[in-house]
Image (tube, grey):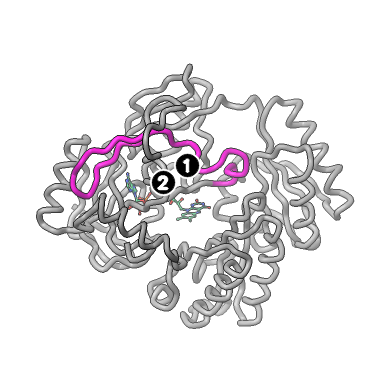
Amino acid sequence: MDLGPYVVEGRSPEAAVFPGSVDEVRAVVALAATEGVPIVPWGGGTAASLGTPAARAGLVLGLARMARLLEHEPGDLTATVEAGMPVAALQTALRARGQWLSLDPPDAERATIGGVIAANASGPRRHLYGTPRDLLIGVTVVTGEGALVRGGGKVVKNVAGYDLPKLFVGSFGTLGIIVEVTVKLRPLPDAERLVAVRFDRLKDAGTAVRTVTGSDLIPSALELLDAEAGRSLGSGPGASLVVGFDGLAEQVAWQCDELRRLTAPLGGHGIAPLPDEAWSRLCTAARAAFATPAAVMKLVVLPVTVADVMEQGANAVRQRGLLSAWSAHAGVGVLTAAVFSPGGQADPAAIAAVLEDWRGMAGAGGGYAVLEWAPLTVKALVPVWDAPGAAGRIMQRIKAQLDPLAILNPGRFVAGI
Ligand SMILES: Cc1cc2nc3c(=O)[nH]c(=O)nc-3n(C[C@H](O)[C@H](O)[C@H](O)COP(=O)(O)OP(=O)(O)OC[C@H]3O[C@@H](n4cnc5c(N)ncnc54)[C@H](O)[C@@H]3O)c2cc1C
């Protein structure tokens, strides 16, 4: 078969297999364990290059054939799904019965529910609804030894013993292959709207974030974009505050009016609704600002400092003769920053210096940074993950329990896991 779609960071896997059942997953893992071949669990592949470069590409274990909605209990607001089901396909099935999974990761057409949980991926609506960690109530996993482990269950109050499902959230395929998940659902809201408010100065938009957070408004999304990131949403110069509301139509209308009233004295103007497709463009607004990014970093900081970090981070880049674009889930303090080289070919050392500046800024305020995407020449100079401190040893022990032969995505995660 053509292994081209599974090449990660220039490295082709030795083979790709697509089991059709939990038993087949177990058989593949058992064989790989016997042969000592590393396994790369593969959902939609949208984040396949996220992580420390692998020493050996190994065997891709794709979940594409395990993509069924197994159970949907509208009365319980839960669903059980095979891990390879794309998030958008799940939403379509749920919508037909008036419900949704309150998660909006980027590239939802391709991103699978298993991959999204393994990466703890989320989108703008995490402001109100949280991340996969908050929505996962049960999980079935094949460990690196081929054992089948079930954690949680199919009802919302169900944890007996350790909360195992949470362990697999954000584990990046290093602890087990997620084969089935049970998630909490919500009824679809009657109405939903996304509006943008423009500010001449980023600082004023930052003040507006704090004003909205402290007000009676209950936004589902609260995104702050600098002028560069705003361009991909059709904004002009200046910063944009993009706010989502959902609920009853009259509540949504009231909140939009209230947003205008609160932001006008702070310099907010040009308030306007955005089309539905803007929701998904928010996730990639920073990356899409200029032609091709030289690197993309996620910074996690205190929400009150988001606008300052953006300003400081953009200045640090300008001083090095480079460009940047910034967007943020402002209410929860999660920023995406992309660096671009105006001349085309970027010097890896200069890009690395910018990323170290940014990581330093996040760390100084008690936060952290993850290098989300960069070419290998840059990854050779800047670690993908922050040092995990004493927790690294605990994580290594958990890894040793669930994947004693270290065959699942070896070396790609924190602490050399
Ligand atoms: C352009 C771009 C923008 C992004 N922006 C954001 C963002 O704003 N917010 C955010 O949270 N994320 C973001 N991400 C990350 C990305 O959205 C998610 O990581 C992705 O949705 C994961 O789904 P997937 O099915 O494509 O997984 P894959 O890319 O196939 O896999 C992701 C990881 O999970 C592992 N994995 C996959 N399936 C399984 C499974 N069944 N069991 C165990 N391990 C598994 C893989 O080995 C890999 O380590 C972005 C990614 C890109 C490329």
Q: Secondary structure at mark 2?
A: loop
Q: Secondary structure at mark 1?
A: helix
| Position of 152 relative to 47 (above/below) | above
Residue 169 image label: 2
- Give the quarter of the image for residue 221: top right
Question: Do labels 2 and 1 touch, CB within 8 Å?
Answer: yes
Image quadrant assignment for residue 323: bottom right
CA gap between label 2 and label 1 equals 7 Å
Q: Is residue 181 visible?
A: no
User: Disc 1 marks which residue?
Assistant: 132
- Reply above or below: 383 against 410: below
Tell me, for residue 336, which label it has, or none. none
Please state the horizontal and vertical placement of residue 324, each as a whole percent of the image: 61, 69
- Label 2 CA crowd tier, 10 Å (few <14, some 14–19, many 20+): many
Q: Which residues are magenta?
A: 123-151
Residue at 42% over, 50% down: 170
Q: Is residue 122 left or right of residue 265?
A: left
Q: Position of residue 296 (x, y in %)?
A: 51, 65
